[in-house]
Amino acid sequence: QTLQAEIIQLDKPLSLPVEVPQNALKGSGGIGLRVSSSLAKGALDAPRNYMREYPYSCLEQQMTRAIVLDDEKLWKKIAQTMSRYVDSNSLLRYFPQGERGSVELTSLALEFSKLRGWDLPEATVTQLRDGLSSALNGRIDFSGYEGERLLAMKLRAAASLAISGELSKGL
């Protein structure tokens, strides 16, 4: 537990008086000091450590783990199994069997791939783009999606198609 912390720019010599509190327990507590040339350096260590041990395994979490860890090898492994997650509407599901696919998850996969420059199999990319195009054009029954929720889903599909340079084909 951290009881006090301080960030100081070290542009000149620094002296900080430190003393043990009168009521401190012997053998407990301590002082930690970390010096870095940048505030950003090391800022992602905690999230990366967390993701290394991340126990969950849906497709979204697997992709996020690869991105946070900057692990292209893990991404390639996920990409090779991604076709197992595609539903009958050409949208990705969170798990290989079960629920219907998700525009959000499908968009996330295509955008991660495009923005990171990490490939997905071309057949999978084509299939996912077709799914987003179908969602955008109302060829998929999204019962329960109404008003703003339906509009947000369609905008998500359009944005993903635009990022991948395929929006004109989706219209």
Image (cartoon, rainbow, N blue to C red):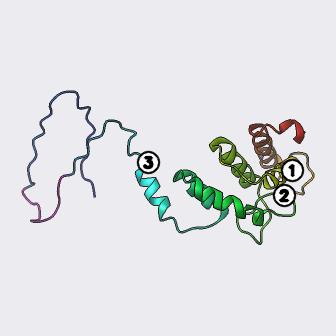
- Which percent across, then down, holds residue 95? 71, 68
- Which percent across, then down, holds residue 123? 82, 54
Find the magenta span and give its range: 22-31
Residue 156: image tag: none
Which quadrant is home to the N terminus? bottom left
Q: Marks 1/3: CA distance?
A: 36 Å
Residue at numbered disc 2: 90
Residue 130: image tag: 1
- Which percent across, then down, holds residue 114? 69, 43
| Residue at (6% x, 56% y) in the render | 22
The answer to whether the residue labelled 1 contacts the one labelled 2, judged by CB atoms less than 8 Å apart, is yes
Q: Secondary structure at mark 1?
A: helix
Q: Amino acid at mark 1?
A: Asp
Residue 79 in the image: above or below residue 107: below
The answer to whether the residue labelled 2 contacts the one labelled 3, judged by CB atoms less than 8 Å apart, is no
Residue at numbered disc 3: 44
* Residue nearest the viewer, comparing 85 with 21: 85
